[in-house]
């Protein structure tokens, strides 16, 4: 059973794509969702901060990634990932 604070957190959570460090810079995700993904200074794909990631062809980018580096993660209303166990690459 969820606590009140957990319920509040879920109320404000959004889905946000995440790229892990297995990215091999193939640029497939950028070709599909260029307003969402871009290469950072290390040459890895990273996720731009947007108010919403719905209708951005994220699922197509996930399917196109040859190393399964992209996944949906929960984030708060500030765009911060809620699951900090995974490695975080973001701009
Ligand atoms: S599709 Fe995958 S491997 Fe290619 S740039 Fe995007 S995250 Fe990296």
Image (cartoon, grey):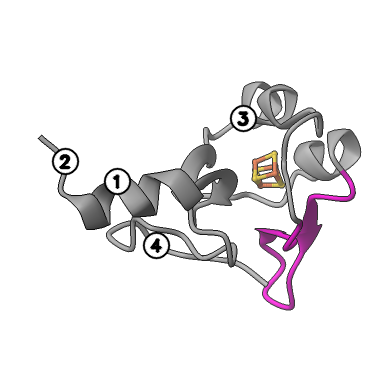
Residue 7, position as x, y percentages in the image: 29, 46
Using the image as rendered, state which of residue 47 and residue 30 is in the foreground: 47
Mark 2 or 4, closer to the camera: 2
> Cβ–Cβ below 8 Å for labels 3 and 2?
no
CA gap, disc 3 and disc 2: 37 Å
Main SS of the magenta part reads loop
Q: Which residue is mark 2?
A: 2
Q: Which residue is mark 3?
A: 66
What's the mark number on residue 87?
4
Q: Which residue is mark 1?
A: 7
1 or 2: tag closer to the N-terminus = 2
> Which image quarter holds the N terminus?
top left
Q: Is mark 4 within 8 Å of ligand 1?
A: no
CA gap, disc 2 and disc 4: 26 Å
Residue 39 found in image quarter: bottom right
> Cβ–Cβ below 8 Å for labels 4 and 1?
no
Q: Is residue 90 left or right of 86 when viewed as pictured?
A: right
Q: Residues within 10 Å of mark 2 (few under 14, many from 20)?
A: few
């Amino acid at each position: 059973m969820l606590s009140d604070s957990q319920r509040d957190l879920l109320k404000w959570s959004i889905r946000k794509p995440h790229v892990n460090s297995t990215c091999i810079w193939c640029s497939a995700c950028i070709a599909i969702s260029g307003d969402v993904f871009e290469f950072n200074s290390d040459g890895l794909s990273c996720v731009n901060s947007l108010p919403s990631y719905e209708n951005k062809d994220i699922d197509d980018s996930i399917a196109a990634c040859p190393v399964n580096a992209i996944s949906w993660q929960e984030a708060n209303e500030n765009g911060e990932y809620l699951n900090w166990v995974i490695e975080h690459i973001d701009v």
